[in-house]
Amino acid sequence: MLKISETDEIVFAPELITKFNEIVSRYPEGKQKSALLPILHLVQAEYGWVSTAAMDKVAEYLHLKPIEVYEVATFYTMFFLKPLGKYVLEVCRTGPCHIVGAEKIMKHIEQKLGVREGEVTADGLFSWRGVECLAACGMAPVLQIGPEYTYYENLTEAKVDELIDSLRLTTAEKPQIN
Amino acid sequence: MGRKLLLEHINVPGINTFEVYRQKGGYRAVEKALKSLSPEDVVEEVKKSGLRGRGGAGFPTGMKWSFLAKPEGKPRYLVCNGDESEPGTFKDRYLMTHIPHLLIEGMIVSSYALGANTSYIYVRGEMMPQIRILEKAIAEAKNAGFLGKNILGSGFDLELYVQPGGGAYICGEETALIESLEGKRGNPRIKPPFPAISGLYNCPTVVNNVESIAATVPIINDGGEEYAKIGIGRSTGTKLISASGNLNRPGVYEIELGVPVEEFIYSEEYCGGIANGKRLKAVVAGGSSVPILPTNLILKTVNGESRLMTYESLADGGFASGTMLGSGGFIAYDEDQCIVRNTWNFSRFYHHESCGQCSPCREGTGWMEKVLHRLEYGHGKLSDIDLLVDVSKKIEGNTICPLGDAAAWPVASAIRHFRDEFEWHVTNPQEAMTRNYGLAHYADPLPKVEPVTAS
Ligand SMILES: Cc1cc2nc3c(=O)[nH]c(=O)nc-3n(C[C@H](O)[C@H](O)[C@H](O)COP(=O)(O)O)c2cc1C
Ligand code: SF4
């Protein structure tokens, strides 16, 4: 499902470069490093994860040393440094979600998908993991799915089933073109 | 019904669009400020309002603004803190989702006051939907002439951008946020220099919470003095409270500061009581970082006075018997909740989120998580309880940023107030795996304090 493997060469599409340029224009002259996080988000949205080859290209584009990109990508938890499923269910596991059933929801997802935290289903469609507080504590339990990071709130096991089934269906209807 | 200054129009259909927001009186504060007030006047109004930072620390906003250095030839920056990652807090996300123009309007007024011509709203990356909402709102405001060059013919220019974070609680700390906005790891800086002197790109910078910035709109519209009439003492105005946990009606509530805690929890106007007919065991009143209190101490101070939702009343009794208003993240725990488990959960959070620069925080949070884990899972020793207190004391005050304290306080306060529940986990490990300690005596009325007479 993912568009690239670990070893693939990366060539950013012109449309992507246009977006990068717009981002860089938000900061003062010479401060283009500020564009790093927004650009890494775009890269992950495009390729599904952030490979070393992609980070090298970002470094080249922003005139940074590759290490400056690696140290940032490894610090922030949202960037996937290895390929995961097309849909990554990120379930809040912190305090307020925890006391109203987040653990049960995670267990249910694990059973339904048949993979452990951080793994990928055989069809390449799904992964899941626990994350820290998503700022939706009043609508707990909650999960979100990138790259749009849509929030799914007040979760129940039935709602999770419905969500996973509908994502499967959407993908079946619109086959991914690699 | 309490007055609503921020959420008054929250239920108006389409209030998230420029048109409807404007129809409801939106952007009047920008017109008033840019046409009839000097930047210094705006700062003065905010000072008069008594507004205190809504991000957690409660530092007076007007005073913070007056510290901003103004060296010749250097730009100044206003950065809005929309990182909102403190467990229990979700008011900023709510505000940005439903009434984004209020934040944009506040950003224009505040940038004008500070003389900032480029301002950033830093929003945690997980809130990508809110980032899109804000970007749309900015485009609409720009289209209507409220952003860009020479706004309303006043000669004031402002460009406003939204910056995504990457998933890191520590980036809510203002100097870590600045590092992150510069495209670096979110490692807090050693202060001084304070951001007011040297912040973003080494230029003078003010960092303010989303709600603080939004509150400048009613302050400018109605005047600082009007705003200061709401509330009690040094807790002026209204505050957004994020209510979560075992409540009948969790959600975001705008309260006039001074509402009694008991009323907030039980009245129909607010949370409507504890869910499923259960009894209340404990409350974390201001986000995960503030001390947890048992029911008897959250409803009343040790002097038997009713506790109010104000900075002062919640802090009454210091850390011995009080807590803090913090970010207003109000988490209610019913009688079925396990305090040991909750404390372990919070410790895991802080361990996960420590940036790792300071050894007491990096190592101490990991150590506390491990010890709490073994207490929760029936392998603890009685000495572990004092060990936790010891580790928490060694973190507190010994780190670059307050995350260390924030990790230490929940542990120290849980043991202070719920020590017998921790001991029970050690003495009854088998039983602790199958049932909870329950409400025990935590809601019992406190014994009267005898006045100490000098002899
Ligand atoms: C670990 C840590 C996390 C923080 N997270 C936030 C946050 O998510 N949002 C926020 O506004 N302030 C947060 N703060 C407080 C900020 O450092 C800063 O005081 C605040 O943004 C100032 O704005 P205010 O004066 O308007 O409250 C955090 C502080 C610390 C130490
Ligand atoms: S206290 Fe913790 S989070 Fe703060 S700078 Fe030190 S290691 Fe980083």
Image (cartoon, coloured by chain):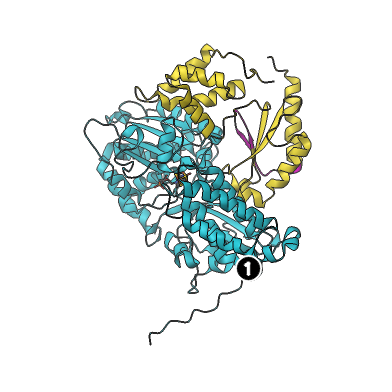
Chain colours: A yellow, B cyan
Q: Position of residue B383 (x, y in %)?
A: 60, 63
Q: Quadrant of residue B174?
A: top left
Q: Residue at x 74, y 43 (%)?
A: A107
Magenta region includes residue B120: no
Query: Mark 1: which secondary structure?
Result: helix
Q: Nearer the viewer, residue B332 or B100?
A: B332
Q: Quadrant of residue B421?
A: bottom right
Q: Position of residue B235 (x, y in %)?
A: 40, 58
Q: Residue at x 49, y 79 (%)?
A: B449
A152 in relation to B296, above or below:
above
Q: Residue at x 58, y 74 (%)?
A: B445
Magenta region includes residue A148: yes
A18 in relation to B173, above or below:
above
Q: Nearer the viewer, residue A121 or B23?
A: A121
Q: Residue under mark 1: which chain is it in?
A: B
Answer few, some or many: residues within 10 Å of disc 1's Cα (few below 14, many 20 plus, some between 14 and 19).
Answer: few
Q: Nearer the viewer, residue B157 or A134?
A: A134
Whether residue B404 sits left or right of residue A77 in the image: it is left
Q: Position of residue B13 (x, y in %)?
A: 55, 38
- Some atom of ligand 1 lies within 8 Å of the CB belonging to the residue at label 1: no
**Which span of residues is magenta-colored?**
A144-157
All told, the count of numbered labels is 1
Instruction: Name the residue type under label 1.
Output: Asp
For the question of whether residue B249 can be seen, the reply is no
Name the residue carrying label 1.
Answer: B420
Q: Position of residue B5 (x, y in %)?
A: 44, 49
Q: Quadrant of residue A43?
A: top right
For the question of whether residue B62 can be seen, the reply is yes
